[in-house]
């Protein structure tokens, strides 16, 4: 899962990016509205964390321009806590709203919910081919027993499970699993797919040569 | 309830109204009977004259004067009806006829008037006077010309008298003076003199007497008697009253004895004495007049009460009308609370003093609302500024505690937290400073100090910051002394210099100049930086106002620096203004009162300065 964080306060940006990375997300960061809008329109993110008070282009304007092109889930993160501000944010196309100061756990939970909903799965537990994926605890179990996955592997399983029945291209996996800072060696999609197959069974992931991967319902 | 304006108005209104009505009623009640009695008295007098005119010695031929033979009764009736109908022309005609038929004594000679008590012409004078009285009661015109009116009659009388001198013993004094002197009439009962005290038998024409016999047609009665006692004549229905004493000595200035008016039970009477001691009393019952008078008085009282009632009712409606807008204003004002500041009093409709009041109140509400919303915004902005550092501290701590972290990472976290805490501290200090200025708690030191030295110190303080970006600071300081708190002024200067460096281009230039003007000290800080767009210029002294969020926040600013500068300068009685050109630079000017330059009460000077400054600010904003 790849997330863009647009926040002008470097300390806050760092801590948000840090916690999300630890959670297994691929995280991109932007320090002003200009850069944020550019990144948000250039890549497909699973979610965007957006501050309102931003240099160059403020959050409202950024959201308005972004919505003309993309339907990506946006979580607004701001110090403006008046009802009118929240209403404006939600009406402006934001999917959720979080007021500073916030708890990191809440931010993570809201992002999970956003990503789930965007994939059309509102229930936190997804079950595909006997594999149960609990997005709350980011754990996977097969036939009742827990399966240990790395963060990357879990992200891959979750991505495929959220798009169960549909083809997930290599580019999509690439874009959703790896952030802009990830080095190319660890980016090898095939390695992760092979590791997941070892843990969850060979036929969990079907390969469509030349196109990508697929998890059948 | 009675302490309200409405009731006060009402009570005053009622009191004034009642006072006016009582005054008016009193006057009415006083004058109504007077006027009524005067009217009756005039009426009685008129009848008395008629009776008097009909008097003649008893035994004279009935219905005609000797020598004439005219129907005297008819003549009297004509005269009476003419007098009653107030017809002067008819009255004169009837009188002339009467004179012709029954020539009165005396001729029209005026000389006789001077000697009224002369036996010769007393009767004539009386007769002329009678006629005048009659005329007076009918027409004011005739009254004004007493001499002219009787002339034709007089001459006629003279002629008649001249033709019949001494014709009969009953010639009632109608003899011209010359004749009378030569041949005094023995039966002249009007005459003063030897026969004065002798009661004389007198009579009235039968038809005149008869006219008093029917009480329903003629309510009057008469009594004729002599001063020496003894009733001579009495009408049929005359009541048996004691007759009034009429002292002969009582005379009007004109020479006639005073008539006597009196009230006897339900009867009103007038008694008069004519020369020769003959008294005539005429009276009538005035019971119906009294009843009419009471009716009138009742009517006046009723009208008065009706007017009072109408006035009170009108006052009630009027006061309600007057009070209604006041009540509306107070209701609306009561509805305006902190949670609902946007309500306003309705000022549509006609322009009144209350509209002015409402408008003034509305303006006051506007000011309160604006001050309040400014306060709310300030609080919101302040908490907003505090949120980010708190968020940083909170999330960093949370992340650090999440799992086992290497020491290096924890150190970094603690470092970040410290940075955020410092930022919060600086923000809190700024807020406190502003709050103290707002509440007036701030105690400024006030002493004369060398401003050029303070500026020099500040320049030295910021020089490292400038050097880092290779910005040149040029100080052009002429010696100047200002009054105030040097530390606070230094804070202002440092803030302006920091801004000038912060928003300058690298290798730019900052110019500080200090000038001593006649009344004030002018400090200007000029930079060659990015400038401030004109639309922001008017707001830059507002709290938390930022031209660009990125700009100040990255440098640790919270958007309160200039607001604090302004508060400090204003507290010193000075002014701060700004002018700017985008990409060419910004210039801040601070004017402070010179040490000892401020004369007490130099209000106009200050006002002028203020005006000039406002203009500067406006001009700056436009450019």
Image: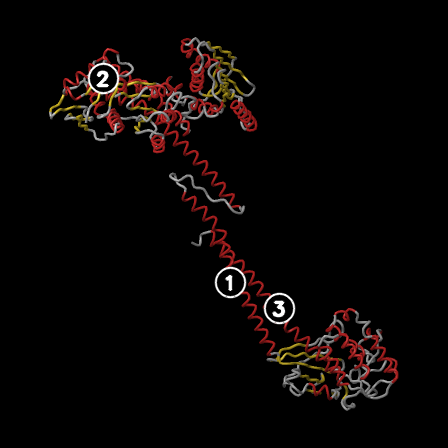
Tell me what residue is drawn at x 23 percent, y 29 percent: A121
Q: Observer-nearest residue: B549 or B499?
A: B549
Question: How many angstroms separate mark 2 from mark 3 (CA)?
Answer: 132 Å
Q: Observer-nearest residue: B291 or A8?
A: A8
Mark 2 and 3 residues: CB-CB less than 8 Å, in contact?
A: no
Residue corresponding to mark 3 = B31
Question: How many angstroms separate mark 1 from mark 3 (CA)?
Answer: 24 Å
x%, y% of residue B56?
77, 86
Q: Is residue B386 left or right of residue B112?
A: left
Foreground tag (2 vs 3) = 2
Is residue A117 visible in the rendered structure shown here? yes
Q: Is residue B4 above or below residue B506?
A: below
In the rendered image, residues at marks 1 and 3 fall on the same chain: yes
Tell me what residue is drawn at x 59 percent, y 76 percent: B290
Looking at the rendered structure, which numbered label has been put on residue A209? 2
Specify how the rendered protein is coloured.
Answer: secondary structure
Which SS class for mark 3? helix
Which quarter of the rendering shows the C terminus of chain A? Answer: top left
x%, y% of residue B34?
63, 71
In the rendered image, residues at marks 1 and 2 fall on the same chain: no
Question: How many angstroms separate mark 1 from mark 2 (CA)?
Answer: 109 Å
Tell me what residue is drawn at x 27 percent, y 28 percent: A118
Which SS class for mark 1? helix
Which quarter of the rendering shows the N terminus of chain A? Answer: top left
x%, y% of residue B179?
87, 82
Task: Locate residue B391: give its quadrant.
Answer: top left
Q: Residues within 10 Å of mark 3 (few under 14, many from 20)?
A: few
Q: In this view, does B459 lie above or below A44?
A: above
Residue corresponding to mark 1 = B309
């Amino acid at each position: 899962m790849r997330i863009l964080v647009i926040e002008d306060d470097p300390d806050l940006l760092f801590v948000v990016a840090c916690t999300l990375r630890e959670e297994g997300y691929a995280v991109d960061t932007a320090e002003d509205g200009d850069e944020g809008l550019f990144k948000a329109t250039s890549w497909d993110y699973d979610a965007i964390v957006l501050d309102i008070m931003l240099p160059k282009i403020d959050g409202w304007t950024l959201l308005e321009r972004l919505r003309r092109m993309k339907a990506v889930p946006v979580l607004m993160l701001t110090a403006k806590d008046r009802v009118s501000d929240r209403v404006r944010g939600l009406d402006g196309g934001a999917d959720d709203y979080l007021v500073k100061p916030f708890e990191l756990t809440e931010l993570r939970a809201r992002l999970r919910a956003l990503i789930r909903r965007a994939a059309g799965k509102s229930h936190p537990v997804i079950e595909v081919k006997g594999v149960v994926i609990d997005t709350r605890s980011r754990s996977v179990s097969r036939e009742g027993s827990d399966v240990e996955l790395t963060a990357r592997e879990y992200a891959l399983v979750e991505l495929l499970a959220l798009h169960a029945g549909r083809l997930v291209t290599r580019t999509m996996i690439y874009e959703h699993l790896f952030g802009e800072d990830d080095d190319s060696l660890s980016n090898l999609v095939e390695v992760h797919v092979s590791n997941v197959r070892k843990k969850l069974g060979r036929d969990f992931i079907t390969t469509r040569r030349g196109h990508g991967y697929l998890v059948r319902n | 309830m009675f302490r309200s304006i409405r009731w006060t108005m009402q009570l005053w209104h009622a009191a004034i109204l009642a006072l006016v009505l009582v005054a008016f009623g009193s006057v009415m009640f006083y004058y109504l009977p007077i006027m009524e009695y005067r009217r009756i008295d005039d009426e009685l007098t008129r009848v008395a004259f008629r009776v008097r005119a009909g008097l003649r010695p008893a035994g004279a031929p009935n219905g005609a004067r000797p020598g004439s033979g005219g129907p005297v009764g008819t003549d009297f009736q004509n005269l009476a009806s003419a007098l009653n109908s107030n017809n002067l022309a008819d009255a004169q005609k009837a009188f002339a006829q009467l004179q012709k038929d029954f020539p009165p004594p005396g001729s029209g000679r005026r000389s006789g008037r001077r000697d009224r008590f002369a036996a010769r012409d007393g009767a004539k004078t009386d007769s002329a006077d009678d006629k005048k009285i009659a005329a007076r009661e009918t027409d004011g015109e005739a009254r004004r010309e007493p001499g002219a009116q009787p002339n034709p009659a007089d001459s006629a009388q003279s002629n008649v008298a001249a033709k019949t001198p001494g014709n009969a013993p009953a010639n009632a004094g109608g003899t011209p003076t010359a004749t009378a002197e030569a041949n005094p009439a023995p039966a002249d009962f009007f005459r003063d003199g030897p026969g004065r005290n002798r009661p004389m038998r007198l009579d009235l024409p039968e038809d005149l007497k008869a006219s008093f016999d029917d009480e329903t047609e003629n309510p009057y009665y008469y009594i004729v008697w002599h001063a020496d006692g003894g009733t001579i004549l009495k009408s049929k229905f005359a009541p048996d009253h004691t007759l009034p004493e009429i002292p002969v000595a009582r005379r009007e200035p004109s020479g006639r004895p005073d008539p006597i008016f009196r009230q006897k039970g339900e009867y009103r009477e007038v008694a008069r004495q004519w020369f020769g001691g003959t008294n005539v009393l005429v009276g009538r019952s005035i019971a119906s007049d009294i009843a009419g008078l009471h009716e009138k008085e009742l009517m006046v009282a009723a009208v008065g009460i009706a007017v009072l009632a109408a006035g009170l009712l009108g006052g009630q409606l009027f006061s309600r009308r007057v009070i209604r807008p006041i009540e509306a204003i107070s209701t609306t004002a009561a509805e305006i609370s902190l949670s609902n500041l946007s309500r306003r009093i309705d000022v549509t409709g006609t322009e009144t003093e209350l509209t002015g009041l409402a408008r003034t109140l509305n303006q006051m509400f506007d000011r309160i609302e604006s001050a309040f919303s400014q306060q709310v915004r300030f609080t919101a902005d302040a908490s907003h500024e505090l949120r980010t550092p708190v968020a940083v501290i909170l999330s960093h701590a949370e992340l650090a505690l999440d799992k086992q972290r290497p020491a290096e990472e924890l150190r970094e976290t603690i470092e970040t937290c410290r940075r955020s805490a410092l930022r919060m501290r600086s923000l809190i200090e700024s807020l406190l400073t502003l709050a103290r200025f707002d509440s007036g708690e701030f105690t400024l030191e006030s002493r004369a100090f060398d401003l050029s030295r303070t500026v020099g110190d500040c320049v030295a303080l910021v020089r490292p910051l400038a050097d880092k970006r290779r910005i040149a600071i040029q100080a052009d300081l002429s010696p100047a002394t200002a009054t105030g708190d040097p530390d606070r002024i230094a804070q202002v200067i440092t803030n302006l210099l920091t801004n000038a460096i912060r928003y300058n281009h690298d290798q730019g230039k900052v110019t500080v100049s200090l000038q001593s003007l006649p009344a004030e000290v002018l400090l200007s800080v000029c930079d060659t930086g990015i400038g401030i767009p004109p639309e922001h210029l008017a707001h830059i002294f507002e709290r938390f106002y930022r031209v660009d969020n990125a700009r100040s926040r990255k440098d640790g600013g919270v958007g309160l620096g200039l607001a604090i500068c302004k508060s400090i300068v204003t507290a010193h009685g000075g002014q701060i203004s700004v002018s700017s050109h985008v990409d060419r630079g910004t210039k801040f000017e601070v004017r402070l009162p010179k040490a000892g330059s401020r004369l007490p009460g130099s209000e106009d000077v200050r006002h002028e300065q203020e005006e000039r400054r406002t203009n500067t600010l406006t001009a700056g904003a436009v450019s």
